[in-house]
Amino acid sequence: MPGLLQQLKPCLMMSPLSVSQFLDPDVLRFDCVIFDEASQICSEDAVSAIYRGKQVVICGDKMQLPPTSFFKQGDVDDDVASDEDVAVFESILAEAETAGFMPRQLTWHYRSAHESLIAFSNERFYNYSLVTFPSSASNAEETAVRFCHVSNGVYDRGGKRQNVVEADRVVQLVLEHIEKWPERSLGVVAFSTQQADAIQNRVELLQKQRRDLAWFFAEERLNGFFVKNLERVQGDERDHIMFSIGYGRDRNGSLTMNFGPVGKPGGEKRLNVAVTRARQQVTVVSSIRASDIDLDRVSSAGVLGLHKYLDFAERGYVALDQHGVLGDYESPFEEDVAGVIRSLGYSVFPQVGVSSFRIDLGVVDPADPGRFILGVECDGATYHSAYTARDRDRLRQEILERKMGWQLHRIWSPDWVQRRSSEISRLQAAIEGAHLAATTRDRAEATTEPLTAQDVHQVGASIAEEANAETSIHIIEPDQSGAQSWTEPYEVAVIRRAPLQCEFHEPRALGCLADMAMEVVSIEGPVHKAIVSSRLARRWNLERVGNRMVGAMESVFRTLSRRGNIDMVDGEFCTLRGASPRGKLRTPVPGRVETFRNIDHISTDEISLGVRSLLQEAISFEEDQLIVQLARVLGYDRTGSTIRSRLGETVDRLVDARQVAREGNRVVLLV
């Protein structure tokens, strides 16, 4: 046993309670002990883990939930009390803060796809210290926080302490969400346990009535649907979060200023946790408005914060003390660039954003005034505000492009002054290219694959060439320094064969299509049939893969298979006959959308290679951790049910083939 513990010594992830129960301090000690979510760990629970380390790092947010008695057995009498009576305890984070530990603040926030999802907390609780990033896909004057007023809601004070009318409205909105955004994850947060129970009961009734929706309500820890109260939601995040306030006027029309846990000590922290769980959208369902809360009768920081948040949900940015979404020009240089953009026929806004970081100039999409097609960055205050060159020139750009949907163009002031005509040509090329990309992407939403980078820049590049720009445009290759030795960037085939002057589905096109398909398979094999079809459709200048094209491609695959040119693996993947298996897992290239593959378009053999390679780097993996880690390698930010199912099936195959084995909840490599 001691030998095994010594092997595990480099890194263990355990709760403080597990450390006390399973790790003998005389056998196993650590050079460094790290606490995550330290705001929820009581000091007495942390001592046993601290004792086993030479150094301690305590990570947490003092504006997150403190440790409470909510989960302590016997503290709450279910028949009498509720989570309104929760007691608050001192956390190890607070202890460390008062003990003089050297603090380091992490300020970047990029969970929220829309700045409005964090703007309230940034203003109310963090004094605008968080650096947030504006989204390109949302109207700068609007927020992603929606207010739904339930005017006839009644709070059953003195009874079940539920608001059933509001709960019914929440379930109705859940159904609307499923029908409108089935691909988005959803969570419901109630401000009390009783209201959460009322909603959960109605959700279960909905499931019985609509068994066709069972897929949406399937339990999934990271992305599945949930109904929780305030005390249980820390650590969760979903695309869409709905709040049910629950509290309101009783049957007699009386409204007390009692709002449960929010009104207790630390209530402002509960509110902060709740309102920062969403990635894309928040819906606040409430039977009261901000104006219904009598500020002369309340002093709790949590209730005052709730009043402010209800006002923000209903009125938007104007409810914040500093609500400027669009700022003023920071320099005559920016104003001059904006004037040129307007002369090209595009609308432009300066200083887009609500935090200390802003996009200098946002070029508006002519077809959709609610989004920006291009962000123009000048070497002004925002650029120089970054502490390091890595933050300034790589990380911020990566977040803006990959997470927030921006396409960026940089202009240096010396170039603008010395080579003005050339820089204007470059600027026009960037705008026209971005406009083309947005227009084509909208048309291609129904296709099997996204727009290629080549298409994005085609128009812009031609304009730049015609203008005979003096300044060379350099393409910086993505940083691959962190890639594993068993991975390689995905290579996309360039089809050199020109299409015939005929329809794709005509019989005489078969030979040409077969030659094109071989070009794709030789470079990208094993490659899914849908990817081959999409590559050929784009070369044939088609916008989508229609039914007739699918039929034509099936003829192509049968012909190549019959000739002995290709083999069909699992009936869906094309590979050159006699080709050796790939020795490395192919991963997407940042910034090149055509290299990202749907999980169903990655062969089982390739996924198996990833599973075995990950296991070779570790003694073993918890199966859930293994799946998450492999999904990240394959380029997925989140692991939904489809991805988990596909990767889990591959693990099952490897178990059946006796290449890996399950030992409890862990997976180990056998051969």
Image (cartoon, helix red, strand yellow):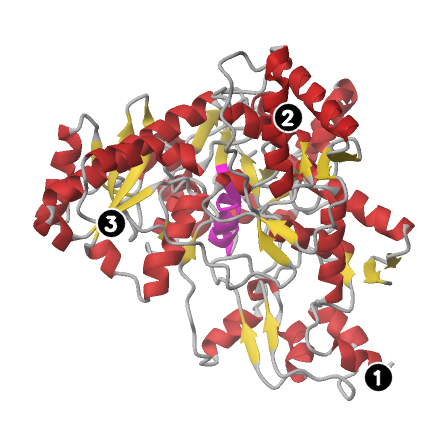
Task: Say which of 460 and 416 sits in front.
Answer: 460
Which quarter of the rendering shows the C terminus? bottom right
Image quadrant of residue 7? bottom right
The answer to whether the residues at label 1 and label 2 have Cβ atoms under 8 Å apart is no
**Is residue 171 among the parts visible in the rendering?**
no
Q: Position of residue 151 (x, y in %)?
A: 49, 21
Image side of residue 349 versus residue 155, left or right: left
Which residue is at a point 75% across and 65% down the rendered structure image?
616
Pointer 3 residue: 472
Pointer 1 residue: 2
Image side of residue 8 versus residue 330, left or right: right
Pointer 2 residue: 514
Q: Is residue 278 magenta?
A: yes
* Magenta stretch, overall SS: helix
Q: Residue 434: give its label.
A: none
In space, the residues marked 2 and 3 are separated at their CA atoms by: 39 Å
Count neighbours of disc 2 (C-alpha within 10 A) and say few if under 14, some if 14 to 19, many if 20 or more.
some
Q: Position of residue 347 (x, y in %)?
A: 21, 29
Q: Position of residue 232 (x, y in %)?
A: 64, 49
Q: Amino acid at mark 2?
A: Ala
User: Which segment is the magenta one?
Assistant: 266-280
